[in-house]
Image: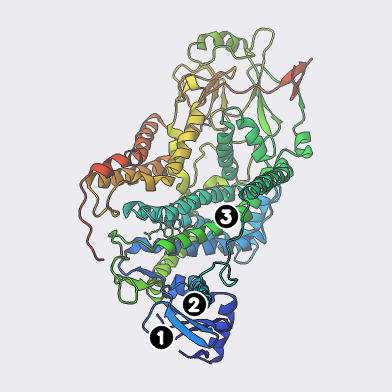
Amino acid sequence: MSEKENSKSFMSSMMSWIDRRFPVTENLERHLTKHPVPKKVNFYYLFGALLMVVFMIQVITGIWLMMFYTNTEEGAFASIEYIMRDVEYGWLMRYMHSTGASAFFFLMYFHMFRGLLYGSYQKPKELVWLFGCFLLFLLMAEGFLGYVLPWGQMSYWAANVILSLFGAIPYIGPDLQIWIQGDFVLSGITLSRFFALHVVVVPLLMIALVVFHIFALHEVGAGNPEGVDIEKHRDSKGMPLDGAPFHPYKTFSALPAIGIFFIVFFAIVFFAPTGGGYLIEKPNFEEADFLKTPEHIAPVWYYAPFYSILRAVTFGIPFLGITSKFLGFIIFAASIAILFIVPWLDRSNVQSIRYKGIYSKVAMILFASSFITLGYLGTKPVNELRTLIAQICTIFYFAPFILMPIYTKYEKTLKVPDRL
Amino acid sequence: MSKKRKHIHILDGMSLYTRDRSPFYWGYLNIEGKIYKKSLKTTDRKEAERFLFAWKNEIFADSLNLTDGNGEEDHHHVEQKPIVDEKRRKALLITSGLMGAVTVAAFAVPFLSAWKPSEKAKALGASVKFDLSKLQPGAMAIVEWRRTPIFVVHQTQEAIDNLPKLNDKVTDQANEVLPSNDKKFTVLKGVCTHLSCAPKYHPEIEPKAWDQEWLGGFFCPCHGSKFDLAGRVYKGVPAPINLEIPPHTFSGNTLIIGEAA
Ligand code: HEM
Ligand code: FES
């Protein structure tokens, strides 16, 4: 143990110079080369990495779009056409950005479903989950704000629907709505502030939360589909026996996944950028018209399940002064809020669905199928039958969570193996 | 651990290093020519550093205890507990907290107020005039006020006579301004009270897909809300309340929207 620096190559002395001032090596080791992750996981565990990739796509294409986009009522729609027609590869930037938004949600829903399946939110990962839920909320806000920017018919009228929800809040609603809009109607003033929120405020918050999300995860360690605690069995150096260093094991296994993702992603960007009206809706190729509502206002597919829940509430609570519209807003908000408390609803002694009992499995199937059904209904015009189905699905959306403290506590679970 | 051994210099005579078969940081101390080494039992660098300093203090304390022999607590090497005036600290925390809150609130005012409608937006929200003389009975004009479509309907005699028949079908029997023989114009905000779509004007008295006994009125295509010709909302539709009536007043043949009567 000499006190001399033992390696004298230029690179390593440079590294130690930096490390003394900024802990590069230490953090690389902590988060990459020495960070142990379970060595056996399934494809569900790749979505987090893909989410990061999509986030980067959105940031980069977004910055380029911003260079050509005009955030005024007069200029917005025209500037989008300009990007599509006159800017070289402008169409690519725009379609990557709009397809990226859909991909973001798609991956996010799977990423969260993984969490529900394998109990990834359980102690001590509550905060990982909670930061994730905030990210979902922010992404929903980000998508909404961004959808207004092209100032097409659907941008305008869909935004009107959402803003009028704020107007439905008793007492403060109407003033709140005017304050958010900055005008008596949704106008160019609203557009400008939504632009600022979309390109600066929400992305900054999201970056901060992704950092929190990852730091929290690296503090408590990643989970696995079996729900086995890999920390229990370690080798003589203190490394988990069922773990492998994040880099190079996980980084390289993520590469093929990223490759496949890019193939699908660009197939959509090149051959079906509007996704048959589900990714970019038809009326949005017409400029916003204040006096003409489109015949049928439908949200983009990723909001459809929640929009269905909103519409399913056709009744209020008159004696409390709650209108159907406001109640719809409350239930709609609750459908997202309930995700935040899942870590405290699950009382099971096992993590993974593989070892949970029959009730958990049924609940998960009910939840997933009602979510998909709600999504389908949300894109269709309403009629009596569809409203009834949406109401039933809304109940099945909530029931698995509301009853979770009961069935997870009393159902019979299987014994989790000791090792992965 | 990596194969490479690390050596981290902290202060003269104080350093951390790693060894081949140990995951932990080791501490090295040189105190007045005497060398001390031991494993610090941690893999965290910052923690290792703290342990190293604590260990150094320990060694100093021990050596002083040995030489003095009386174990008194007042030697300068060992950190002394600062004397804390808890009351004063609390008072400082509270006052600075309050002042901070006031500052934040004061700063919030301009930023939040900036979001309110600007003077320009307010000016654009001023009243508009509309000439009623050319509007035939049964016809509807759409006037734009605050960029909202305002429906101005010239009611027919038949429509006025039909309204009472609908009293049981609507939620709110008496709209504030029901058309009558001497007041034949109905002025409504053309914004569905459900989720702000524009209801469509259907004055025809004929069976409709949405109502077999339709006596004329407004139908919202978005989620199927129905309103009668006076803007009264039907029971059992998503819209909770009647179509709104914007502030308006008449002056001869001129309708002024945006000014209350
Ligand atoms: C911008 C959005 C997000 C990004 C970039 C992101 C990124 C990641 C990454 C890279 C991982 C580790 C790899 C993996 O397990 O897939 C992870 C794990 C996790 N994420 Fe996310 N995430 C996002 C949103 C969410 C959301 C919305 C939730 C749920 C509400 C969530 C919940 C979790 C949980 C519970 C884990 C830990 C899984 C485990 O180790 O068992 N994340 N996230
Ligand atoms: S907006 Fe008119 S019925 Fe929903």
Q: Nearer the viewer, residue A126 or A114?
A: A126
The residue type indicated by label 1 comes to Lys
Q: Tell me if mark 1 has few (under 14), some (14-19) or many (20+) residues whose alpha carbon lies within 10 angstroms of its own.
A: few
- Residue denoted by label 1: B3
What number is the disc on residue A403?
Answer: none
Q: Nearer the viewer, residue A296 or B156?
A: A296
How far apart marks 2 and 1 lie (CA) works out to 41 Å
- Residue denoted by label 2: B66
Return the x and y of residue A344 as percentages of the image width and height: 38, 45
* B56 over A159 or under it: above or below: below
Return the x and y of residue B137 as percentages of the image width and height: 66, 16
The quarter holding residue A107 reads bottom left
The verdict on label 3 being within 8 Å of ligand 1 is no
In the rendered structure, the answer to whether residue A142 lies left or right of residue A302 reads: right
* Marks 1 & 3, CB-CB < 8 Å contact: no
Q: Nearer the viewer, residue B153 or A331?
A: A331
Q: Chain of mark 1?
A: B
